[in-house]
Image (cartoon, grey):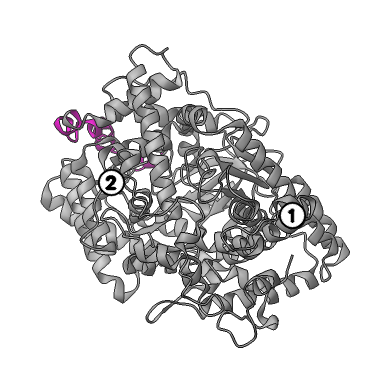
Amino acid sequence: MTRLTTIALALAAALASSTATAQEVPTFGFPAGFSPLKMDTSADPRKDFTRYAAGKWFDALVIPDDSVRISGLDLMSKRTDVAVRQTVEEAARKAPTAAQGSPAQQVGALYAAGLDEARLKALGNTPLQPQFLRIDAITDRNDVAKELARLSLVTNEMLVMGGTITVGIRDKTRYIVAAGDGGLGLPNFEDYLKPEAARYREAYLTFVAELLVLAGIPQADAQAFAVKALAMEKRIAATRQPLAEHKDPDKRFVEMSYAQLKELTPGFDWDGYYATIGIPLPTEVTAIEVNSMRERAAILAELSLEDTRMLLKWEYLRKSLGGLSQDFAQPGLELTRVYFGEGFQLPPLSKQVFNTIAAKLGHPLGQLYVEKTLSPESRRAVEDMVGRVRAEFRVRLEKNHWLTAATRKQALDKLDKVKITVGYPDQWIDYSSVDVRPGDYFGSLERITEFSSRRDLARFGGPIREDEFVDPRSTLPTVINAGYNSLRNSIEIPAAFLQPPTYDPKGDPATNFCAIGAVIGHELTHGFDSGGRLYDEIGRARNWWVKDDEVKFVAQTGKLVRQANAYQVLPGLHANGALAVTENLADVGGIAFAYGALEKYLQAHPEENQVIDGLTQEQRCFLAWGQMWSDKARAGYLRQVTATDAHAPGGYRAYAAAQHEPGFYKAFGIRKGDPMWLDPKDRVRIW
């Protein structure tokens, strides 16, 4: 992971924020999990449920300078940061005497090297120079694709454009060859095109030029190339697929012959590319962002060889910032401030380093973290809840009144085959062969990355082998998140997510069912949402729905689009219903399954159906959901994520899904005419 190479990475760092000691993680005077103290009982739940559920909590929240948002989940992330930092610090103490290649040696040595800012500053751009010299040696355009392939091995990313392997989109029994377009520097491709985003583009010019100067490029050359880079990326942005279409595999993934790929991208040496990364030349490929690939090829054909070499240096540089000194983080910080305000600060170096360790050595770090934080009892309790929430979904599918028998049968089969893993993988990835050298931060990162790249590519032609808990943004054991993978029909719930406010081993049934249980239901629903329903029980891209059922489904989800579009995020800015429809549907499913599973649990365990703090279990259920999503965010952040993030703002999520559940109205006496009342004709009852 690089440090602030794009706003997306800055944002990821910002939301987790700083760490030092457990005492320094703010509490704002409230417990970490559900608490009636967070409520504003002067508010009327029939009028403003979000305020009623968490008004005092909201008033107390203060957004730190190095963050763009603060919430219970963000504070959970801060507490996790403390635990992770303590884990890596302990590993650093043990590393000198630990067995070579052991998790403690690798994590500890990498952490110590990353914290040695004096050495990194003294090295400056020296670590970049070996690759820069190789790029400067290119004298033949036919070598450009080979060099991009070689650079992809040490960054584990596509630069400009390139290829890799993946499990078949429609045939899950084999690996296929994929080709795609590289990424863009700004987080939202529309920022390259919209007139009102001109200030972002101006800031991006400065960002590119300053980084190139730090990398050793003369200032005049750096500034001239920055203009060219922005022009190239604007051309690519104009060809990008709309974000709302990314969930549709028929639009996202285009199958073509190898000959057609070459016709699409004339002048790009795909033979040399695939040979360099060690893949036999394919007869067919699956392409992603076809129009952008066509434009990339046209740009490469137009560029002089000198500009092409500069482009390769820039692409390599922006993917490699994480191993360099803090000087290389400053341009990204300034760009981030243009988006989110002058008060924004970088997280501490320790936070940046262990974020990088999580991205590069996620499993060795995860092993050390899980040993200290996740008890077998908590894992078993959540696994039991998984079974109850899945059973509730199954009952609803069996009784579903609008699905045809054929669709229902396949839906039940898909639900039964969802693999749900709690906490950590069944099999950890073994990194012990990687040479993580004391004091060699940049080199160790590149060796780890190349190991991962080659390990992935070596699968081609062999049996399917899927790693679990490997996504540094969503499923590593140290990540605050949970994720459904439509290509595998699987759900992973990281160990770090099993703490308040999502799960409390001492909590009552309602506050756990309607927090972590609702998250489980949310992820299960993703298998049957607007995108997930286009994949079958083993993750193949296959539309198994009867046409009439599709029509009814789309009509129902249209209600969610209209509901979200009516919500005002900021004055003049409304939620993006079309972009957020899958997440909003997952919220509806999550709270519905959790509430239903809770009711059945209480029927079987009447002794636990207790009124606590004057609140019934039903009331505590919806309040726990509302408190979990309540947050406070900067306006610049809200404007950015409303355009690009499929998740609606927390203030909306705190109540909107509950409006589709009849138990919500019963729990708080909400009647027709109340602001929280949603007319039955506008409620979604898909599952």
Residue 291 visible in rendering: no
Task: Give SS at disc 1.
Answer: helix
Q: Residue at x 47, y 53 (%)?
A: 265
Amino acid type indicated by mark 1:
Leu
Would residue 160 be counted in the magenta stretch? Answer: no
Amino acid on which the number 2 mark rests in the picture: Pro
Q: Is residue 123 above or below residue 582?
A: above
Q: CA distance from mark 1 to mark 2?
A: 44 Å
The boundaries of the magenta stretch are 119-145
Q: Position of residue 234 (x, y in %)?
A: 34, 64
Query: Closer to the camera: disc 1 or disc 2?
Result: 1
Measuring from the top left, give residue 541's x and y in whole percent: 68, 53
Reading the image, the residue beneath label 1 is 602
Hey, which quadrant is residue 381 in on the image? top right
In the image, is residue 128 part of the stretch drawn in magenta? yes
* Residue that numbered label 2 is attached to: 347
| Residue at point 72%, 71% (across, down) | 685
